[in-house]
Amino acid sequence: MRGDVVFMEELPGSHAPPLSKSVERMIVVAVALLLLVPCFWQPYILAGDLASHSYNAWLAGEIRAGRAPGLTVEPVYTNVLTDLWLERLIRAYGRSGAEPVVVALAVETFFWGAFLFIGGIHRAKPWMMAPSLAMLAYGLVFHFGFLNFYLSTGLSLWIMWLLWRLSRLRVAVALPLVALAFLAHPVPIAWAAGCLIYFHISVRVPPAQRPMLLVTGVSVLVLVQSVLTTLFPSLWSFDQIFSLEGMTGLTGTEQVWIYGAKYLWVAGGLFVVWGRLFLHRLDQGQVWQDPVVQLWLLNAAAFALMPKAIQFTSNMYALLYVPQRISLLIAILFCAVVGGGSHGKKFTSASLVLAGIFFVAMYLDQMALNGTQRQVAALLQTIPPRQRVVVALKDAGSPLNGLVHIGSGACIGRCYDYANYEPATAQFRIRVNGENRVVAHTMNIVRDLEEGRHVVTATEAPIYSVCAEPGQQVVLVLRRHAAGEKTCVSKIRSTLQFGTP
């Protein structure tokens, strides 16, 4: 067996025709600038938990200034990196100045980390995969707003690129990135460590014995799943696999299915393009002995085996959306599997068309969500400062609720989001010390507020909430709830649902 650790290089036809250095530099600059456009094309980036991150960064400043009694800012050492950046920038530039900078940095880190990782495997720039990687960069996990997890994944990809071929210099450069990635989120860095260990073991195993290594890896995953489900309350069901969401998640195409059924056309097209690329990879031979293919299959096995939610005993809030997070890792590794094909022109063209449809749909949805944000913000401007507010809006017809934390964003600098879930979980920087006038102090109250079934108490009154009045055209109104009244939850159609009345 040869000592070369880059197994993919042994495959024939695994390189795309090289571009000149000047052309490559121009393409790099153009792609980097294009990646920034969605960060600035609307006043606000409405992506799930992102508004919550920004709100809690602002709230941390309120606590430090003594304007939020009953809350404290505790030192934490992971799941916090983007929150620290947001707190500093919001203090200086406000939400509209802080969010685009932090998000743009995260997007560029993720995209170029994936690009370099794939290119490092094949020793060629994977331009054929650039449209796919751009969609993944703005895909489901991005729109969940899991910004720390997302940034840690990007940093972990840089680490994997560096440590795919070991040297003292590469290790020295990777160590600060490991610290940053852990400060952002521990799970992606653990994933990267597992992938690197598996790869460096596998390339030292004769090719004929590598399938047995894959079987061992799957057995370890089964053991981990058994331990997790035995020790901790968890949720697993066959729907994780045998459903439309499960099938798209298992293939990684779920990442481009964000707001509504219109994105399924993009997911279907991407499945066809990726399928053709995989057939080409099969033609190259030596597939099942390839460590990168085995890593992809192991991640697919993890998707099928791991619970969709895990309640660790030390936490008051479960780890949710586990399959969706793994789906992003599956998609990245699949791009690594097929990213060295030599017949890239037609596939790149097809991927560019799909990416164009994806980003046009995303622009229209972001425009619609920003419209709803403006309505909510206008209503909250009519109340006295620093009042308690609940905005429980759900986007009808979309599997992803883009309105989930819209009230948090609208409250920055103006009011207090009483349904803010972070302090009550005791898992984030901001902690709650009993009842207060800023935020609900238990998760039970938070859940009741989110579902519109909380009855306002005398100590809480008044609470303002944004509700929808149904009619020919849904109108958002502001209600002032006194003690004994119930807060509201409303379903409205915000993102564009083509083909529905």
Image (cartoon, helix red, strand yellow):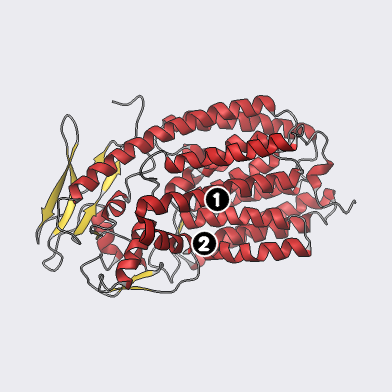
Which comes before the other along the chain, label 1 or label 2? 2
Residue 248 against residue 49 in the figure, above or below: above
State the residue in front, 239 or 370: 370
Q: Is residue 121 left or right of residue 469?
A: right
Residue 70, by quadrant, is bottom left
Location of residue 473 in the rendering, given as x and y in whole percent from the top left corner: 19, 31
Crowdedness near tag 2: few (<14), some (14–19) or many (≥20) residues, C-alpha within 10 Å: many
For disc 1, the marked residue is: 326
For disc 2, the marked residue is: 184
Label 1, secondary structure: give it.
Answer: helix
Q: Is residue 178 left or right of residue 145?
A: right
Residue 167 against residue 469 in the figure, above or below: below
Residue 440, by quadrant, is bottom left
Location of residue 301 in the rendering, given as x and y in whole percent from the top left corner: 61, 49
Residue 28 against residue 154 in the figure, above or below: above
Location of residue 280 in the rendering, given as x and y in whole percent from the top left corner: 73, 31
The residue under the point 76% across, 53% down is: 212
Label 1 close to label 2 by CB (< 8 Å): no
Label 2, secondary structure: give it.
Answer: helix
Tag 1: residue type? Ile
Q: Quadrant of the C terminus?
A: top left
State the residue in front, 490 or 169: 169
Tag 2: residue type? Ala
Q: Is residue 130 left or right of residue 463?
A: right
The residue under the point 36% across, 26% down is: 498
- Given this view, does label 1 or label 2 mark the residue nearer the observer? 2
The residue under the point 53% across, 40% down is: 35
